Structure formats: structure tokens, C-alpha cells
Image (cartoon, helix red, strand yellow):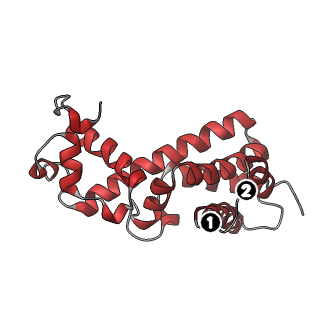
């Protein structure tokens, strides 16, 4: 049963709006998201949305924040499965690419509607924290950890965007090989 087929009664409208908003973003471009359509799908009046989000930008920031939380969870799980260290760091990069592949709308949302003003690199989200910590621990001798983090992020993000834009088609094994920070060539 869809949210539109049953009335809203569970008591946490903000969470319902975020959950349904995330579903809508996977169905359509984030910029096409309509607050009226979102309210209809949740089963409330359009004005009810404004009790939790003063405008569309606030809703989009909340959706991007949830997308970042999901990305971080995927990366954390991948790192733990790999056993941490350099294998875990590489696994977080591969998880980043896979998240983009599996959740293209959410992935694009994070960069189109950042949670914090300014550059995504300044965000204090868990995904960025993991990247910085991994880079600090694993940067080759003589390499600035900040530069290593940016290089690693650029590699994963570049591959993700090439995939999303239809420029390359790669399987999971290729993603792992491209992102593996221990490979030298």
C-alpha cells in the first residue's frame, strides 16, 4: 500500500515527509520535487509540510542529510567487512561508487543541495570524517593527508559520475580495482 493510499496517522510527519521525499527523488529529478505532491503522497495538506520545513530548500537539505547518513552507513559497513586499514579505506571508496550507482537520485541530491552552506568538503558528516581519518592514517610518507583525502575522494567521485553519466560501465570487480588505494599502477 502506498503512502497516498492510506491517510497519515503515525505521528511523525517530519520523518514521513523525509522518507517519502527520498522515494520521490529516486523517481524524479530532485529539482522537480513538489511539496504539494509530497504532501499528497504522505496524506496531509500542502500547508502541513511548512510546519516542519519553512521552504523547499530546508526540505532538500534534510533529504540530503539523510542521504549522507545512508552513504556513511554503507561506507562504515564496507570498511568493517574489509577489516579496516587500507583495505577498509578502499572499501569505503568502492561503497561510495556503489551507493551512487544504486541510489543515483540521492547521490546527486547530496551535491546539488548540500546540507551545509559552502563546499561539501567542509561538511562534518560521518562520510567526510571517515575519509579524513583514513587519509590521515594511510597517506604515503611525504604526502599531505588533506591532499591524499582529496585525491581519494576525487577518484571515487569521478568514477561515480562517469558511471551515472553513462560514460563508463564497470562491474563490482572493476570498481574495487579502480578504487584500491594499495595498487600502484
Residue 73 in the image: above or below residue 169: above
- Residue at (41, 63) in percent of width and height: 114
The reply to whether residue 124 is visible in this rendering is: no
**Image coordinates for residue 19, horizontal then vertical, percent:** 33, 42
Quadrant housing the C terminus? bottom right
Label 2 environment density (alpha carbons within 10 Å; few <14, some 14–19, many ≥20): few
**Residue 26 appearing in the image:** yes
Residue 116: give x, y in percent of width and height.
38, 62
Decide: few, some or many residues near mark 1? Use Cα within 10 Å; few <14, some 14-19, many ≥20: few
How far is the residue under mark 1 from the one under mark 2? 10 Å
Q: Which residue is mark 2?
A: 170
The part of the image, by quadrant, that contains residue 100 is bottom right
Mark 1 lies on residue: 166
Residue placed at 64% from the left, 62% from the top? 163
Q: Is residue 100 left or right of residue 11?
A: right
Label 1: state its secondary structure.
Answer: loop
In this rendering, is residue 133 above or below 57? above
Amino acid at each position: 500500500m502506498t503512502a497516498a493510499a492510506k491517510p497519515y496517522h503515525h505521528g511523525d510527519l517530519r520523518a514521513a515527509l523525509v522518507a517519502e521525499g527520498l522515494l520521490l527523488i529516486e523517481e524524479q529529478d530532485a529539482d522537480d520535487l513538489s511539496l504539494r505532491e509530497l504532501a499528497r503522497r504522505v496524506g496531509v495538506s500542502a500547508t502541513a509540510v511548512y510546519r516542519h520545513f519553512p521552504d523547499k530548500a530546508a526540505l532538500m537539505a534534510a533529504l540530503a542529510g539523510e542521504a549522507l547518513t545512508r552513504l556513511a552507513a554503507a561506507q562504515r559497513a564496507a570498511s568493517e567487512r574489509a577489516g579496516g586499514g587500507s583495505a577498509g579505506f578502499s572499501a569505503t571508496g568502492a561503497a561510495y561508487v556503489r551507493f551512487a550507482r544504486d541510489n543515483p537520485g540521492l547521490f546527486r541530491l547530496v551535491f546539488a543541495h548540500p546540507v551545509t552552506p559552502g563546499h561539501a568538503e567542509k561538511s562534518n558528516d560521518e562520510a567526510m570524517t571517515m575519509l579524513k581519518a583514513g587519509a590521515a592514517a594511510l597517506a604515503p610518507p611525504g604526502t599531505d593527508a588533506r591532499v591524499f583525502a582529496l585525491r581519494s575522494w576525487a577518484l571515487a567521485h569521478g568514477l561515480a559520475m562517469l558511471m551515472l553519466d553513462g560514460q563508463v560501465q564497470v562491474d563490482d570487480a572493476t570498481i574495487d580495482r579502480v578504487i584500491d588505494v594499495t595498487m600502484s599502477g
